[in-house]
Image (cartoon, rainbow, N blue to C red):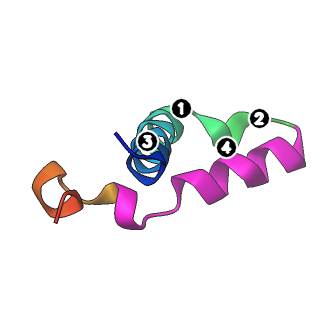
């Protein structure tokens, strides 16, 4: 497995965890901002088939 594939898998799993987490309740604005950036819809929100295209 190459580095790019590993990076994409890591980003996708991070996205899944971020969207399932109640990050809006975190009092720290910097941590909340980072989680919001991860949770923003993008390539990671695609289905598995579309993601692999």
Neighbourhood count class around disc 1 (C-alpha, 10 Å): few under 14, some 14–19, many 20 upward: few
Instruction: Choose mark 2 or mark 3, whichever is in front.
Output: 3
Query: Which region is colored magenta?
Result: 28-44
Looking at the image, residue 40 lies above or below residue 12: below
How many labels sit on residues? 4
Q: Would you say the residues marked 2 and 1 are in contact, meaning their CB atoms lie under 8 Å apart? A: no
Mark found first going from the N terminus, 3 or 1: 3
Pointer 4 residue: 24
| x, y percent for residue 49 | 10, 55
Residue 21, which numbered label? 1
Q: Nearer the viewer, mark 3 or mark 4?
A: 3
Residue located at (49% from left, 47% from top): 7
* Place of residue 50 in the rendered image (x, y in percent of width and height, measured from the top left): 15, 63
**What is the x, y in percent for residue 44?**
37, 56
Tell me, yes or no, whether the two marked residues, 1 and 4, touch with CB atoms within 8 Å.
Answer: no
> Which SS does the magenta portion mostly show?
helix
Q: Distance between the residues labelled 3 and 4?
A: 28 Å
Q: What element carries label 1?
A: loop
Q: Which comes sooner in the sequence, label 3 or label 4?
A: 3
Residue 5 covered by magenta stretch? no
Q: Quadrant of the N terminus?
A: top left
Residue bearing the label numbered 2: 26
Closer to the chain start, of discs 2 and 3, is 3
Please give the label number shown on residue 47.
Answer: none
- Looking at the picture, tell me which residue is in the foreground, 33 or 13: 13
Q: How far apart are marks 4 and 2 (CA)?
A: 6 Å
């Amino acid at each position: 497995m190459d580095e790019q594939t590993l990076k994409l898998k890591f980003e996708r799993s991070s996205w899944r965890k971020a969207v399932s987490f109640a990050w809006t309740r975190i009092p720290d604005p910097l941590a909340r901002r980072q989680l919001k950036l991860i949770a923003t819809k993008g390539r990671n929100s695609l289905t598995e088939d579309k993601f692999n295209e």
